Image (spheres, grey):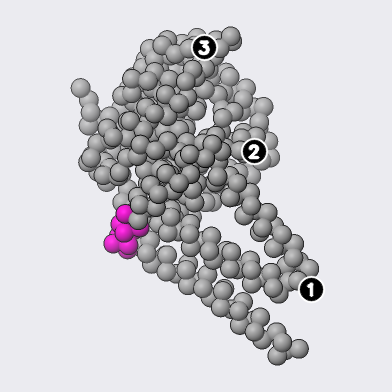
């Protein structure tokens, strides 16, 4: 009996050892700027290849991949729980886990360890008054831009042409300042509405970048005020900005000077909301005053967002917030509800570009 099981134990130790070796190797790579730069260069090649490969397919290939992977892993786990089939499926599970982990790391994971954008910006501390001043600036910008967009029958902002917004985002990639980014822009439209939109709505997910297919997924059920900025944010991931708040910053750059008013309003609205979130504990009275000074149209948009969030709030949202927070911290990022890094980046950049 022991002799029959010995090859199984050897194979199990082998694949478990390979997985452990990968953890250690990629940890070493993440701490070595030379290797991080090399993986960043490789990302541009494989990302461009995958965008061209999957962009012509009208549905989300990445969602299909995750569905199949999830089903396969679930079947493996069921087989592992059964004594008769356990041994063979433990090996299969470890093999798949090794392949997925390796592919994820070389396609995406190491990009979290790139040089932070904030190192390119002025190091001076940001004052409370400076943040408040910028908040008032974006309140006025939002009011002005909101008057230029279309509404539905309830007076809520409604996107008229999503493909035009997508094309504008790709065009704005070419305008990014070289001192902030030397990443290669793309002309390939690989934005995809996710097949998991209902699940995304109930977990609070606005969109996500699929590193296996280079697709920028978004939740098509979102209020129109959130979709353009979500597309810009996921486009930043397609460029190779892995950190969430840096992707927010690049998304802000992609929309702040755009002539597309739908994109511009969504970006300005996100910036204003982020500034208010950063101030709510420091100066709640100021935040209250700003919210009261929203234009009637902006208040309608905000109320619709709140209604949408309340409708889909529940245990899934709490669970996702917890797991996403763990994921971000594992990749040396701040938690999912922290806006301070984005606000720091944005305020420092605005400081550089005062007219």
Quarter of the figure with the N terminus: bottom right
State whether residue 139 appears in this view. no
Residue closest to the far left: 355
**Front residue (pair 47, 234):** 47
Query: Is 34 part of what is drawn in magenta?
Result: yes
Measured as percent of width and height from the top left, residue 288 is found at 48, 19
Residue for point 67% across, 70% down: 90
**Front residue (pair 42, 328):** 42
Residue for point 66% across, 86% down: 6
Residue that mark 3 sits on: 151
Q: For residue 201, which quarter of the picture?
A: top right
**What is the C-alpha distance between the residues marked 1 and 3?**
61 Å
Quarter of the figure with the C terminus: top left
Please, what secondary structure does the residue beneath circle 2 have?
helix
Residue that mark 2 sits on: 199
Q: Nearer the viewer, mark 1 or mark 2?
A: 1
| Callout 2 crowding tier (Cα within 10 Å): few <14, some 14–19, many ≥20 | some
* The residue stretch that appears in magenta: 32-41
Query: Is 189 part of what is drawn in magenta?
Result: no
Measured as percent of width and height from the top left, residue 127 is found at 31, 32
Task: Say whether disc 3 or disc 2 marks the residue closer to the N-terminus.
Answer: 3
Residue that mark 1 sits on: 84
Q: Is residue 177 above or below residue 228?
A: below
């Amino acid at each position: 009996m022991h002799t029959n099981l010995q090859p199984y134990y050897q194979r199990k130790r082998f694949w478990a050892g390979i997985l452990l070796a990968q953890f250690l190797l990629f940890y070493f790579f993440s701490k070595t700027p030379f290797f991080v730069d090399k993986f960043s260069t490789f990302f541009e090649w494989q990302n461009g290849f995958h965008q061209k490969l999957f962009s012509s397919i009208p549905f989300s290939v990445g969602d299909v991949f995750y569905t199949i992977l999830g089903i396969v892993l679930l079947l493996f786990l069921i087989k592992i729980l059964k004594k008769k089939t356990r041994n063979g499926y433990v090996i299969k599970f470890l093999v798949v886990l090794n392949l997925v982990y390796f592919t994820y790391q070389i396609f995406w994971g190491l990009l979290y360890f790139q040089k932070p954008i904030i190192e390119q910006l002025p190091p001076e501390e940001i004052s409370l008054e400076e943040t408040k001043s910028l908040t008032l600036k974006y309140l006025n910008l939002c009011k002005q831009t909101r008057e230029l967009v279309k509404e539905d029958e309830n007076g809520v902002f409604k996107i008229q042409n999503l493909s035009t917004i997508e094309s504008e985002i790709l065009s704005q990639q070419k305008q990014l300042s070289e001192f902030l980014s030397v990443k290669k822009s793309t002309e390939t439209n690989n934005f995809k509405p996710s097949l998991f939109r209902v699940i995304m709505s109930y977990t609070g997910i606005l969109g996500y970048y699929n590193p296996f297919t280079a697709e920028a997924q978004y939740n098509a059920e979102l209020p129109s005020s959130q979709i353009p900025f979500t597309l810009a944010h996921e486009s930043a991931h397609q460029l190779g900005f892995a950190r969430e708040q840096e992707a927010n910053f690049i998304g802000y750059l992609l929309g702040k000077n755009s002539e597309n008013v739908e994109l511009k309003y969504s970006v300005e609205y996100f910036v204003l909301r982020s500034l208010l979130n950063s101030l709510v504990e420091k100066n709640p009275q100021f935040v209250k005053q700003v919210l009261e000074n929203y234009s009637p149209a902006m208040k309608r948009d905000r109320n619709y967002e709140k209604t949408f969030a309340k409708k889909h709030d529940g245990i899934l949202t709490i669970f996702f917030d917890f797991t996403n927070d763990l994921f971000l911290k594992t990749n040396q990022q701040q938690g999912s509800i922290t806006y301070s890094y984005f606000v720091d980046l944005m305020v420092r950049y605005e400081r550089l570009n005062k007219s």
